Image (cartoon, rainbow, N blue to C red):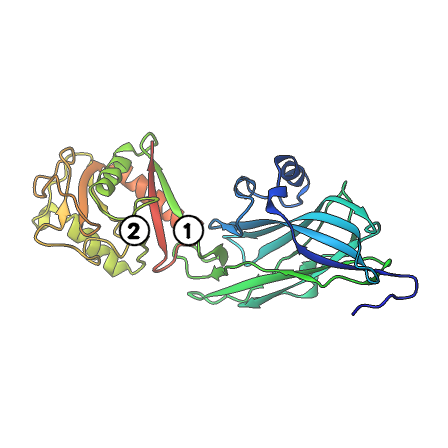
Amino acid sequence: MLLPEGNKTAAACVTPGDQSDLTAPRLTALANRTPVPLPDYCYENATGGWWITRTDACAISVWTLQVRNVRTGAIEGEMGYIQADLVYTDTSGPYWGHQVVIDKTDGWGKIGGTTVSGSGSCTGNCTATAADVDFPSQTVTETGLTYGDIVPRTTVTAPGSLGTARTAITYRFANPAWTSQPSPVTTRPTFDVRCDNATPGTDTVGCVVKDYEPVHVISLSGPNPDYARHIRDAQTSGLQGAYPDGQPLERLTDATKREQNGNRACPQASSGGYPRPSGYSCDEYPFRSTWQGAATGWHPSPNPGRTFNWCQISALPTGITGGPGGWSACMIPAGQNSSGGALLNSFYISNRVIEKDQFYVWIVA
């Protein structure tokens, strides 16, 4: 049982609030004041816990601080606030950040002069010194915004290595008029950040939210329309990798296996394979750089290979549909094939897609 302290009879506690209080005006006010801006999807999905992408994640929740008289139990003050978490990564650097914003939305009674301060930590393959945590004591007001953050560093350095880590931020309210201060609140992500020095094509360390499977977007009206058309037709025929409803692809980094995939899907004419029309080259799907490729993937018999009536390959059957097994080949302009491959490699690097990582391909109009 709490007892008065001198002439102080008020005690405070913090409890989850009503998510229906996340009104459009309150979210707009939050967006206008947040130090590191939250992505738009955070406000579009402002309830239901954490939302993630490959490079960031956020959670917006509602809380209530309540002040009661320790003698009578009567409520003598309340403060409503929004807590906004943001995790943001650097795909080409060894750091990431976790920011917590406390945005007061309303209040009355014995809450004047309330301050908030915090601390942070990380667990896993990371370090976080006192200099990496910034959450000083700040006075909570309706016209301002209080916040803190932690910017840990990964301990991953050696080529080929990777590691995961998770942050936590603990904040606490205080007021000299209260005989009992509320218990601290700890907020931590429900996912790990993965940092690696194992992404082919770059020798830098970078970090991502590993639980999000990235999506490679290719446009039918972009610079490589035949490349996009082949992938669209291959996915429509049942081959995997289609976003959002297909089974994901998995990256393959072994050079020998990638070459085997390419040679099986697109054998050279000199080896008994398909003739290349002038200015064209053979494109395969799933990509040779995936475990679902023509040599490393699972394929039905007797006709694992397929093509389409516009692809100029008479040696493969058309009209094949069914499950995700198999592969497709098509002759497309050589420049588009090279450009499509370069964009795929850029997608791998920018999303830190390493061996066995899953991803999707989305063909858009």
Give the total number of marks visible in the rendering. 2
- Residue at x-position 44% and y-position 65%: 159
In the image, what residue type sits under mark 2?
Answer: Gln
- Residue at x-position 28% and y-position 54%: 290
In the image, what residue type sits under mark 1?
Answer: Ile
Give the image location of residue 117, x and y in percent.
74, 58
- Residue at x-position 42% and y-position 65%: 160
Give the image location of residue 3, x and y in percent.
84, 68
In the drawing, does residue 187 fall left or right of residue 288?
right
- Locate the C terminus and report the quarter of the image it occupies: top left
Give the image location of residue 309, x and y in percent.
13, 34
Tag 2 residue: 247
Circle number at residue 99:
none
The answer to whether the residues at label 2 and label 1 have Cβ atoms under 8 Å apart is no
In the drawing, does residue 277 fall left or right of residue 145?
left
Q: CA distance from mark 2 to mark 1?
A: 22 Å
Tag 1 residue: 349
- 82, 224: nearer the viewer: 82
The answer to whether residue 34 is seen in the rendering is: yes
Secondary structure type for disc 1: helix
Q: Quadrant of residue 187?
A: bottom right
- Is disc 1 surrounded by few (<14), some (14 to 19) or many (20+) residues within 10 Å? some
Establish if 284 lies above or below 152: above
- 141, 359: nearer the viewer: 141
- Residue at x-position 25% and y-position 52%: 288
Of the two numbered discs 2 and 1 in the rendering, the one whose residue sits closer to the viewer: 2
Secondary structure type for disc 2: loop
Q: Earlier in the sequence, mark 2 or mark 1?
A: 2
Establish if 137 lies above or below 278: below
